[in-house]
Image (tube, grey):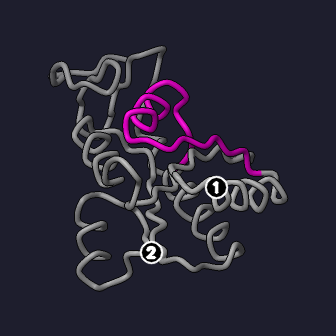
Amino acid sequence: MAINILLVEDDPSLANAILEGLSDQSIECTIVSTVANAIRAIRESRPDAVVLDLMLSVDSGLGVLTAVRAQRDPTPVLILTALGSLEHRVAGLNAGADDYLVKPFEMLELIARLTAITRRNNRIEGSTLTFGPLLLDLTTRRVFRDAQHHRQCDQIHA
């Protein structure tokens, strides 16, 4: 299974190093450096996972996470940041991150964590049906269009 990752990182040398490390493992990676571009890319390209730096030059990367989770988007997010205190890690996980890795890091660990969160997400996706911009969550019986909740289905007919 090929994995497609969105990397939100504003340090070009680190972004390129991560890109190279991921591509060595046949993991596709798109790089963006701003919150606005990250939110747009998640919406439009639907990556398998997001690797998110919290310390972006213009905004906090946490804005990406809160925007994605506010739209009930289940895309797995791994925070990759230099902010390693217990408070920062707990805040990131409580905000909806699926995993948290502190810089400096080992590439093999990043790859293993990405593989794990995408594997978990693929198991969860069995309870949803998608067609174009529509998503039906069979577990909660909710319908979404472009990640926006529209109404709850009272009955689902096969």
> Disc 2 to disc 1, how far (Cα)?
14 Å
Q: Quick check: 29 left or right of 84?
A: right
Q: Please, what is the three-letter code of the amino acid marked with disc 2?
A: Ala
Q: Quick check: 110 left or right of 135?
A: right
- Residue at 60% x, 43% y: name it: 31
Query: What residue does disc 1 label?
Result: 15
- Residue at 47% x, 16% y: name it: 131
Q: Quick check: 41 left or right of 83?
A: right
Q: Give the x, y percent position of residue 117.
A: 52, 61
- Residue at 80% x, 53% y: name it: 23
Query: What residue does disc 2 label?
Result: 82
Q: What element carries label 1?
A: helix
Q: Quick check: 115 left or right of 68?
A: right
- Residue at 64% x, 76% y: name it: 109
User: Which image quadrant: the C terminus?
Assistant: top left
Which residues, given as a range, are shown in magenta?
27-49
